[in-house]
DNA sequence: GCCGTTTTCGGCCCGACTGTTTTCAGTCG
């Protein structure tokens, strides 16, 4: 049983309880716990071993005991009992858009429906309309929902893909008739690594006009819902977008609401109630009926006696408490980054020459650029041997001479951590390079003990400055290697080896939760794009978002440092 | 089932949209 199964099991429990008609707050508790577990991933095992489960948000005594049972035995009696009472096929029924627990229970109890196929047949034969509250249109909607569910690919897309779609749509919206302003909200604004749908906010004094403009967007394939202030759309490629329209005077509260997360919003609204205020996307309502409008988002927080909380922190993972106590971190910003520590060139599998990479780095105002091509062990990437390194050094010096006002170009390497735990170059070769990144690219499926042996040896090697993309995961495509992240972070902190937050949108590795733990343990980090083309320097924004989600302050990030400080650190570390 | 500048018991966010309804329940975010 994996840790992902753990999150899924708790989500299934929430759904089954809901179909059973259990109290909503009990259901919410399991759902909340499931979200917490999903955000953690494998780290839950480390937390469990440390006996700190109940410190997790939404985990109390009862749920901690269930997590314990699951991790010890791989089973959960409570879940098995529940699954025996409520047919598991109903969980598929629940996935159909527009069907919630009440409908699912109704289908089951009144028509004996326990699977998607049975539901489809009942809808086709007109049986569903016999139920109270159901009519022909509901049947048609359900059939469409089943079809969409079957044809749907992976639910969530990469942060970068969502970002591009959003930028394209915003560009259109901002020119729209009756639209004063438009911006991104939702999980995209919070910088989550994957995005379910786009949430965009539009400011307008004339909502009907603005809505008309929204609906004129060329990439809409279907209008899923359409009200006076809110519309839900399907775009080409299947991505969905929700657009809210609010007057500028309410922009702040609307943006706060649309950004979420839902759990964060619930906490804020609870806080408001304590102060005799009711908070919604429209602003605050006083008990006496008065209203407080928020044109700026900061005013929402200010009204509650809080400093503005950066969107990336709004996951109900302690940020509200930290805000109350005035200990929100000073998060790293993209403008803090002074250079790039991990870039490839045509010397290995990069698509641009060192000169081309350096020219763009210069245009971006970088103070330094590390060319860190692959080592020979990664044959598929045309890795470098010792002789290549010598000739590459000459080219770097030539480029440096040509771009005298450009960034300082350093020669690094992304050296392979081989399957036996040794590195692809002997120490004396590594010692001759300006910066060494050690990464795993192969034998990622080894068992935990061997993977950890490799990682720890690399961390302990005094010539290794940074560990690249620690877990090797590819989002939506490849699971992380089986490693004890806690142990790796502790070793990195002890040896002063930095850890990369790889900003490539497929990787984002370290991920947010790992980065947060790394900072807690005193690790140094580097936000690296792993650029194989000058355009990839733009990935910095995704790396920074991930770091911010991990509560990472600028001073913990190597490449916010000046060249002098960086060189001094590199010198001392060796 | 969780949780505490109201509380270890008694609370637990708020509104838009849809489809079915003559005033609302269910779903969603």
Image (cartoon, coloured by chain):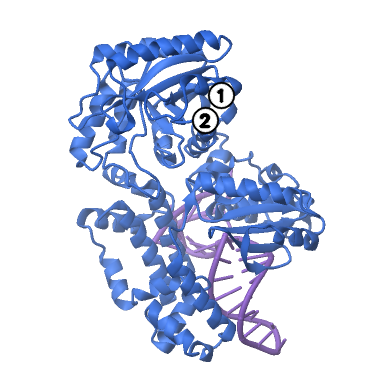
Give the x, y percent position of residue A377.
25, 27
For disc 2, the neighbor class at 10 Å (few under 14, some 14 to 19, many from 20) is many
Residue to which mark 1 is pinned:
A360
What shade does chain A have? blue
Examine the rendering and report whether any part of residue A22 can be seen: no
Disc 1 chain ID: A
Residue A270's image quarter?
bottom right
Q: Which mark is residue A537?
A: 2
Using residue A355 as the reference point, say whether residue A223 is left or right of it: right
For image coordinates 32% across by 56% down, the residue present is A6
For disc 1, the neighbor class at 10 Å (few under 14, some 14 to 19, many from 20) is some
Classify A277 as above or below A161.
below
Mark 2 or mark 1: whose residue is earlier in sequence: 1
Q: Are marks 2 and 1 in contact (CB under 8 Å)?
A: yes
Residue A247's image quarter?
bottom right
Q: Nearer the viewer, residue A368 or A373?
A: A373
Can you say which quadrant of the picture contains the N terminus of chain A?
Answer: bottom left
**Is there one chain holding both mark 2 and mark 1?**
yes
What shade does chain B have? purple
For image coordinates 27% across by 53% down, the residue present is A2
Give the x, y percent position of residue A72.
21, 54
Disc 2 secondary structure class: helix
């Amino acid at each position: 049983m994996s840790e992902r199964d753990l999150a899924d099991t708790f989500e299934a429990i929430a759904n089954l309880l809901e179909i059973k008609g259990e109290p909503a707050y009990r259901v919410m508790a399991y759902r909340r716990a499931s979200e917490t577990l999903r955000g953690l991933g494998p780290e839950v095992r480390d937390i469990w071993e440390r006996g700190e489960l109940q410190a997790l948000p939404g985990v109390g005594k009862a749920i901690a005991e269930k997590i314990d049972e699951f991790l010890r035995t791989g089973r959960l009696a409570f879940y098995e009992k529940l699954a025996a009472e409520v047919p598991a096929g109903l969980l598929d029924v629940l996935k159909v858009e527009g069907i919630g627990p009440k409908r699912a229970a109704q289908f089951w109890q009144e028509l004996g429906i326990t699977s998607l196929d049975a539901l489809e047949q009942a809808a086709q034969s007109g049986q569903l309309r016999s139920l109270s509250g159901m009519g022909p249109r509901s049947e048609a909607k359900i059939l469409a929902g089943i079809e969409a569910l079957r044809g749907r690919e992976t639910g969530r897309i990469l942060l970068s893909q969502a970002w591009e779609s959003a930028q394209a749509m915003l560009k259109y919206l901002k020119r729209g008739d009756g639209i004063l302003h438009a911006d991104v909200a939702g999980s995209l604004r919070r910088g989550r690594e994957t995005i379910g749908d786009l949430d965009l906010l539009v400011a307008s004094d004339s909502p009907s006009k603005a809505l008309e403009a929204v609906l004129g967007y060329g990439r809409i394939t279907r209008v899923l819902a359409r009200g006076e202030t809110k519309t839900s759309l399907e775009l080409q490629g299947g991505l969905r977008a929700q657009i809210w329209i609010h007057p500028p005077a309410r922009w702040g509260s609307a943006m706060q609401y649309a950004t979420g997360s839902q759990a964060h919003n619930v906490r804020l609204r609870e806080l408001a109630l304590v102060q005799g205020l009711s908070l919604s996307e429209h602003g605050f309502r006083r008990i006496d009926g008065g209203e407080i409008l928020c044109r700026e988002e900061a005013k929402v927080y200010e009204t509650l006696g809080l400093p503005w909380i950066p969107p990336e922190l709004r996951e109900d993972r302690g940020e509200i408490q930290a805000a109350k106590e005035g200990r929100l971190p000073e998060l790293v910003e993209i403008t803090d980054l002074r250079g790039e520590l991990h870039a490839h060139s045509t010397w290995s599998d990069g698509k641009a020459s060192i000169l081309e990479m350096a020219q763009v780095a210069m245009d971006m105002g970088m103070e330094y650029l590390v060319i860190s091509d692959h080592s020979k062990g990664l044959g598929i990437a045309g890795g470098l041997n010792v002789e290549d390194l010598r000739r590459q050094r000459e080219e770097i010096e030539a480029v440096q001479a040509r771009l005298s006002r450009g960034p300082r170009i350093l020669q690094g390497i992304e050296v392979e951590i081989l399957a036996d735990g040794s590195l692809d170059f002997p120490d004396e070769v590594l010692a001759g390079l300006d910066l060494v990144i050690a990464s795993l690219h192969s034998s990622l499926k080894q068992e935990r003990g061997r993977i950890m042996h490799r990682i720890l040896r690399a961390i302990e090697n005094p010539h290794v400055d940074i560990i690249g993309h620690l877990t090797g995961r590819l989002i939506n495509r490849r699971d992380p290697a089986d490693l004890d992240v806690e142990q790796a972070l502790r070793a990195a902190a002890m040896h002063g080896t930095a850890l990369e937050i790889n900003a490539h949108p497929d990787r984002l590795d370290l991920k947010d939760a790992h980065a947060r733990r790394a900072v807690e343990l005193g690790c140094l980090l580097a936000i690296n794009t792993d650029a194989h083309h000058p355009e990839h320097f733009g990935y910095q924004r995704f790396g920074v978002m991930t770091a911010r989600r991990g509560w990472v302050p600028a001073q913990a990030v190597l490449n916010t440092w000046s060249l002098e400080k960086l060189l001094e650190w590199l010198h001392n570390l060796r």
